[in-house]
Image (cartoon, rainbow, N blue to C red):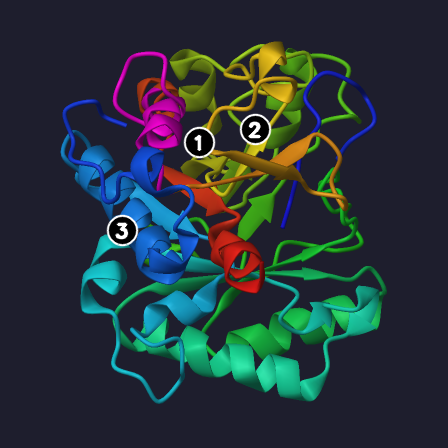
Amino acid sequence: MVSVCLFSVSGCAANTGLSSMTKDNQITSQNDTIKYRDEMRNFVIKISEYAKSTKPNFAIIPQNGIELVTLNGEISGSPSTAYLKAIDANGQESLFYGYNGDNKATPKDTKDYTVDFLNVSKANGNTILVTDYCYSAHKVSESYSKNAALGFVSFAAPERDLNLIPNKDFPIFNENTEDILTIKQAKNFLYLLNLENFDTKSEFLSAIQNTNYDVILIDLFFNDGQQFTSEEILKLKTKANGSGRLVVAYMSIGEAEEYRFYWQKAWKNTNPLWLDKENQDWKGNFKVKYWNADWQKIILGSENAYLDKILNANFDGVYLDIIDGFEYFEEE
């Protein structure tokens, strides 16, 4: 998972007219009746249908939780056709490096297990975007070559906090001058969420404009909580070489973050029904009952909802985090 701290320089990460997939308000004491994987799939499908109803080419990219691509969560299971059709790509962290620590090779059994599921999505027409966490030259090179051999598009992140644009010693892999109109055309991407190294919005925007990445994956907000405007996002859609690219917004749907615009201080004392325990690995992030209609209204369906803000800011897609949130509830 990735978390972003928006209001400090120390980095960290429903449409009311749409039918709710469950009525959690009525069954909070009966969690054993909830099919957590189905509910996450349903939520992603709902997000996709809502976004694509106004922007048909808007890219839907869930990160991690790759077991959702089959109905039973097993590699031998039948593909989840509705889910696979609703998404345009799968994001995956630490496929070759980073699972047990930055710059450390991911165990082979873990890598092989994940690749099998990623290939299910790829076989159904989806792009695979891999973020490996490594910084030594040899491992960065290996990350790119191994992912490319599998037909995956990858980014070797030099810092877990996703706070750096790789320097000239680590040139863009598969850099090109092509116009990128859809995620399927992308040959590389930059994942940059924590903007602690940029003093101002304009400094950050200029740094991005001077790159040739095909896809830029960023947050909707700058460090100080200022939202990027549609005009600013439009400026980022041109590479330094003059060709076009995509700009995709990060959005967590499996956890609530107390540094986000929607957070209400009173929630810590009088929790809404959908708010669960704090994530001990990422302070300020709280597990959510993502199937709950009230949480989903925070995400989409009104002018002030998270996804609606992203759509109105002229992004080309959304990168959905904490997709593997179902694991927390299955293990409770």
Name the image quarter holding residue 76. Answer: bottom left
Is residue 280 magenta-colored? no
Q: Which residue is drawn at 83% across and 27% down?
A: 10
Which one is earlier in the sequence, the residue at label 3 or at label 2? Answer: 3
Looking at marks 1 and 3 on the same chain, the residue that comes earlier in the sequence is marked by: 3
Viewer-nearest of discs 3 and 2: 3
Which x, y percent locates residue 296?
Answer: 34, 32
Q: Is residue 311 left or right of residue 1?
A: left
Disc number at residue 171? none
Residue 209 numbered tag: 2
Q: Is residue 256 above or below residue 314?
A: below
The three-letter amino acid code for the residue at tag 1 is Thr
Residue, disc 1: 238
Q: Is residue 293 magenta?
A: yes
* Marks 2 & 1, CB-CB < 8 Å contact: yes
Provide the residue span drawn in magenta. 291-308
Q: Are the residues tagged 1 and 3 within 8 Å (C-beta)?
A: no
Q: Work out how far the residue at label 1 is from the one at label 3, CA to CA, in angstroms.
A: 34 Å
The label nearer to you, 1 versus 3, is 3
Q: Which amino acid does label 3 sit on?
A: Asn
Residue drawn at x 50%, y 79% is 115
